[in-house]
Amino acid sequence: MTDDHVATMPGPCERAPLLAGVAGHSLLLVTLVLVVAALTRWRLIDWPGLFWLASFAAMTAIRLPYHARNRGNAVMAGQRGTAERIVMVGMFATMMVLPLVHLATGVFAGADYTLPEWMSAAGAIALAPTPLLFYRSHADLGRNWSASLELQRDHTLVTGGVYARWHHPMYIAIWLSALTQPLLVHNLVAGALVIPAMAALWLLRVPQEEAMMRHRFGADYDAYRERDGRWGARS
Ligand code: SAH
């Protein structure tokens, strides 16, 4: 991605983040209602489904305070094109709404599949540390975090904490959630669709995000990138 792309972004201006206000509250309310509805059926849900639900609740609880705190951030630049909106809706649908609706109602039972127990256990083991990485990446980004592609007015480049080891720790955590979801929610619609959705987000978002950061932080960002290896691991 070249700087040409960044130049197509709107110039500096103050505005509310993409998920601020009524939309953000509605999403939270829908999520809460679905979690409660799923919990009322807990006897009908197998242990991998309950494990997924617990991890989902933990990750939602981790994000909520950052969502609330950063809602008022003044956004200087961002990418709100149609593609960005589509992948955001795709992630919201496949990572949250579809599995919660399925656990709450069993509506997609026709697309259920069975897996050997060890595969569910492997999914649970891989997912178990994910909320911690999700939490650390939110804590390290602090006021710089946003759910969508944005730069805050007083954005700083974070190079410490988990960002010293990886360039995209939050996306790694989300990848772990996405890859383990079909191992825990045994349904083609509610469990598996998140993988193509996350692949689309990753392929669209990462080059744009890196171009945006390079455009904003220039040599500092290049130095941060050079400090680390291809996947951000220290050499
Ligand atoms: N890609 C990162 C951050 C995801 S949150 C990760 O996976 O951990 C998305 C927002 O974080 C982007 O809009 C960008 O503004 C911000 N961001 C990404 N990397 C950053 C960094 N090293 N320092 C500060 N902000 C960063």
Image (spheres, rainbow, N blue to C red):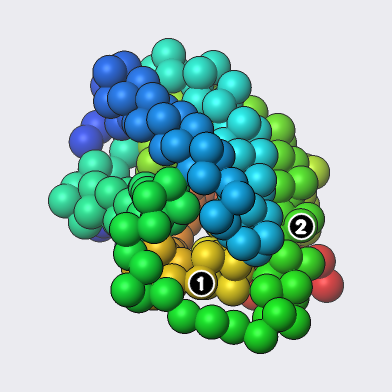
Work out whether residue 106 or residue 10 is closer to the camera in this orientation and state it: 106
* Residue labelled with disc 2: 128
Determine the image quadrant of residue 45. Answer: bottom right
What residue occupies the far right of the structure in this picture? 235
In the depicted structure, whether residue 167 falls above or below residue 185: above
**Residue that numbered label 1 is attached to:** 186
Q: Which of marks 2 and 1 is in front?
A: 1
Q: Is 15 rendered above or below residue 214?
A: above
Q: Which residue is drawn at 46% across and 52% down?
A: 103
In the rendering, which numbered label is found on residue 221?
A: none
Q: Which amino acid does label 1 sit on?
A: His
Q: Judge whether residue 172 can be spotted in this image.
A: no
**Point 50% across, 33% down: residue:** 36
- Relative to the observer, which residue lies in front, 209 or 20? 20
Q: Classify residue 228 as left or right of residue 60.
A: right
Q: What residue type is labelled 2?
A: Ala
Q: Is mark 1 on a helix, strand or loop?
A: loop
Nearest the viewer among 213 and 28 is: 28
Q: Position of residue 38 (x, y in %)?
A: 49, 43
Disc 1 residue lies near ligand 1 with CB under 8 A: no
